[in-house]
Structures are given as C-alpha cells and as structure tokens.
Image (tube, rainbow, N blue to C red):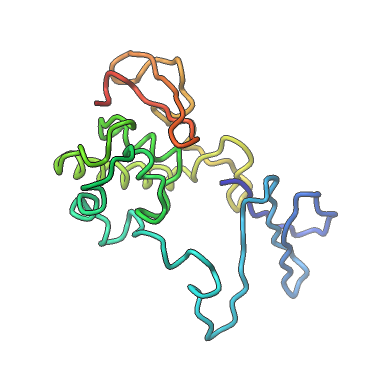
Amino acid sequence: MTGYFKFIENSSHPCKHTRIRFFDKNNNELRYIDVRSFGQMWWINKGLSINKIIKGLGSLGPEPFSKDFDANYLKKVISKRTKSIKAILLDQTIVAGIGNIYADESLYSAGISPFREARTIKKNELIKLKESIVTVLKKSIGSGGTTFSDFRDLEGENGNFGLQTNVYRRTGKECRKCGNLIERQKITGRSTHWCPKCQK
C-alpha cells in the first residue's frame, strides 16, 4: 500500500523511514523505505513451512490471474452473501490482491454498482466482472502500479496508473463515458467512487 525499494550505489545516511537495508559484497545497498510502516518482510530458512510462519497466508483466496479465479468460483462464494460486492472484492479470503483502487475501477468497468448485494449479481455480470478485474490489474501493472502517496518502483519512478483511473479519486468530475458526475461514499470504512448512471 505504501513504501518502496531504493538501490544505493554510493553510501549515504538513510532517512528516518528506512526500515530494512540489504548490502552486497561491493557495499551497494537496497533499502526498503516506508513512511507508514505497512510493509512486512520475513526471512524464512530453507525447509520451513511458509504458511506456518506467515500467518494468514494459507487463508487467502485465489489470485485474479490464477486458473481458480473465474465466474463459477465467484458465483459459488457470493451466492448467499448479503454484503456489498465492493466489500466482497476487498475480502482477501475471497480473492487475494484486489485493493480499494482496483475494486472501484473493476466495478466501474463491469458496470456494477459497488453497493449491490453480492448475491444479486448474475452469472453474465460475474463473467464481465472477472474480465474487468484482470484487465484493470494488467493495465495497472503495465503502468507500474498506482501512486497517490509514496510508492516508487525499483528505478524510483511513480506508478502511473493513477493518471488513468476512471472513478477513483475523481469525485465531482465528469464520468468519461456518460458525463454524469462521479460520486464518493464509504463502504466498510473505505472510500468508494462510482458513476450512478453507468453502474447498476
């Protein structure tokens, strides 16, 4: 969510937000810098079980790019859920790796209101949602991720997907499809952005 790696060839004093420093035999350094201290790292000795050491890893749902993530899977896990589809997408035990930005953008792309009860979403809509999630994530990865605060890639560059968002952080601006104004409201404590006309 925040933080970045920085490669240092000439030794310099680390900033106060430097959390971890790795050195090679030439004294080059890789730093992990994280203002908000959200990031975590584990050193796991060979032969130890990753799932036993990193708590919660075994309870993650499938990743969007895995073969296990499809419309049939989504239909199965949401068929009786009364939670909003936005809350479902943010639940890492259902699907791993969809954050707030990508949930908003995927729902917009699929034309689904973030407030809809998950169980009301039909199979054809789930097919479109699955495709939208994969497309949005691929587009974001191709743009180097999303930077709204301090994220940087290994070259120190911002992620540029934030420049391409359709709804996220565009409250009060015109929808790129219909011209209606983008709205914002909280769902399960997270800011949610959507177009009331395009998303039903």
Q: Is residue 195 above or below residue 78?
A: above
Within the image, what quadrant is residue 147 found in?
Answer: top right
What residue appears at the point 41 percent right and 61 percent down from the top-left corner? 60
Q: Position of residue 42 (x, y in %)?
A: 61, 69
In the image: residue 123, left or right of residue 150: left
Report x, y in % for residue 16. 81, 49
Q: Is residue 157 left or right of residue 167?
A: right
Rendered view: 79 above or below 188: below
Q: Residue 115 location, x and y as percent?
A: 33, 31
Q: Which residue does the image show at 60% across and 44% down from the upper left?
A: 151
Q: How many marks?
A: 0
Residue 152 image offset from top left, x and y in percent? 60, 46
Left or right of 53? Residue 25 is: right
At 27% across and 22% down in the image, what residue appears?
A: 198
Q: Quadrant of residue 106?
A: top left
Residue displayed at 74% across by 75% down: 25
Quadrant of the rendering where the C terminus is positioned? top left
Q: Residue furthest right?
A: 13
In front here: 62 or 119? 119
